[in-house]
Amino acid sequence: MARRWYTALGVNLLLGIPGVVPLWMLWYIASNWPLAELGLTVREPTENDGVMPALVLCGPVVLLFAVLWWLANRPLAERTALTAGGYWLLSVLATLLPTAALFANS
């Protein structure tokens, strides 16, 4: 069963649902500091504590999700019939799909 591409699609779609939270955290950090410094976004006016509190709060959540995503995908990548590049592309896009659906709906 793991040799089929839709197994990887299903696993990563399910991982993408709770993955909305760490992706939002990454966007929050990026939009308030590096992208705001470049002039690409506008910093939240009440965000004046600096980047360290955000990294302390968001870092463990993002790291935990990344480790769980890797542990779920590594065994599937070895057993699937897809090429390595095709598998990882499918995995990343399927994980981002719930977040993209929320963006499209808002």
Image: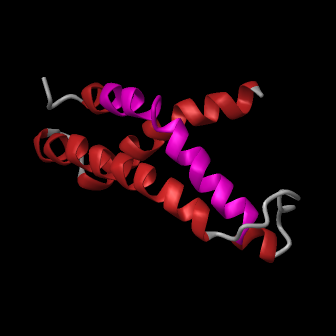
Is 1 left or right of 7, judged from the image as shown?
left
Stretch in magenta: 9-33
**Residue pictured at 45% horizontal, 32% vertical:** 18
**Residue pictured at 52% horizontal, 54% vertical:** 58
Can you say which quadrant of the picture contains the C terminus?
top right
User: Residue 81 location in percent, x, y?
Assistant: 17, 39
Give the vertical position of 2 relative to 45 (above or below): above
Tell me where residue 52 sits by quadrant: bottom right
Q: Which residue of the protein is positioned furthest toward the bottom in this rendering?
A: 38
**Residue pictured at 64% horizontal, 53% vertical:** 27
Confirm whether the magenta stretch covers residue 7: no
Residue situated in front as seen by the camera: 54 or 85: 54
Tell me where residue 85 sits by quadrant: bottom left
Residue situated in front as seen by the camera: 82 or 106: 106
User: Residue 28 location in percent, x, y?
Assistant: 67, 54
Give the vertical position of 53 relative to 6 (above or below): below
Residue situated in front as seen by the camera: 83 or 55: 55
Is 64 left or right of 104, judged from the image as shown?
left
Residue situated in front as seen by the camera: 87 or 98: 98
Give the vertical position of 96 relative to 61 (above or below): above
**Residue pictured at 11% horizontal, 40% vertical:** 79
User: Residue 10 location in percent, x, y?
Assistant: 33, 25
Can you say which quadrant of the picture contains the N terminus?
top left
Give the vertical position of 43 relative to 71 (above or below): below
User: Residue 43 location in percent, x, y?
Assistant: 83, 62
Is 63 left or right of 27, judged from the image as shown?
left
